[in-house]
Amino acid sequence: MAGDWLSERRTEAAADRILDAAEELFTRRDAATVGMNEIARVAGCSRATLYRYYENRDVLYTAYVHREAFRVFGGLGEALAGIDDPGERLLEGILTALRRVRESPPLASWFAPQRRPIGGELAQRSDVVTGLTEAFLRSLGIPDAPRRARWLVRVMISLLTFPGDDDADERAMLEDFVLPMVRSA
């Protein structure tokens, strides 16, 4: 007898539904205050089911951050199409990623300066966020991409938590301070 060929899809769908419920709550409230009981209630599942997919809140938060990191970085190449200069691609890539996080209410709530900076904590220790940043730097031919990616993630967390005065101010800071450091040999 063949196994349940839909079981993997159901597992993915259930996990996504739980993350969607968490996202709904993150849109309305400070992510650091959202508990597993609330997520289970909004997802329409029991706590036991929730814990079957995510053993604790940290694991769920990490899964959410990873999913959203792929969304933020997804399509970055398309957004940068037509920009040939590596420095300009880097600058626009950073600005585009910052803008995508800020335009997403559930993600933006993770970086509010008056709240516990859980977005920064998770992004800094996320292999996915660092790996995507490293891959982007490698695509631009930037040397020592792993180390520079870790540093660039920290810079972006800083800008998400404590933004510049306006878009022009952030662009100028990135041009003056970040581009020379990331591009240097």
Image: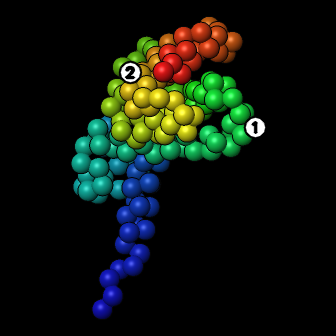
Location of residue 67 with respect to 153 vertically, above or below? below
* Number of residues whose C-alpha sits closer than 10 Å to that of mark 1, classed few (under 14), some (14–19) or many (20 or more): few
Question: Which corner quadrant of the image does residue 61 belong to?
Answer: top left
Q: Which amino acid does label 1 sit on?
A: Gly
Return the residue found at the far front: 185
Q: Distance between the residues labelled 2 and 1?
A: 35 Å
Looking at the rendered structure, the number of numbered marks drawn on it comes to 2
* Number of residues whose C-alpha sits closer than 10 Å to that of mark 2, classed few (under 14), some (14–19) or many (20 or more): some
Please tell me which residue lies in front, 70 or 2: 70
Q: Which residue is drawn at 69% across and 12% down?
A: 168
- From the top left corner, tell me how far across and down residue 127 is, in percent: 36, 38
Q: Name the residue under label 2.
A: 117
Quadrant location of the N terminus in the rendered image: bottom left
Location of residue 88 with respect to 138 vertically, above or below? above
Left or right: residue 114 versus residue 180 is left
Q: Residue at x 32, y 37 (%)?
A: 35
- Labels 2, 1: front one: 1
Q: What residue type is labelled 2?
A: Pro
| Residue 92 seen in render | no
- From the top left corner, tell me how far across and down residue 24 is, in percent: 49, 41
Please tell me which residue lies in front, 86 or 111: 86
Question: Which corner quadrant of the image does residue 77 belong to?
Answer: top right
Q: Residue at x 37, y 64 (%)?
A: 11
- From the top left corner, tell me how far across and down residue 25 is, in percent: 45, 38
> Which mark is on residue 82?
1
Q: Residue at x 44, y 54 (%)?
A: 16
Please tell me which residue lies in front, 180 or 23: 180
Q: Give the SS element for disc 2.
A: loop
| Residue 15 seen in render | yes
Q: Give the SS element for disc 1.
A: loop
- From the top left corner, tell me how far across and down residue 118 is, in percent: 36, 26
Q: Are marks 2 and 1 in contact (CB under 8 Å)?
A: no
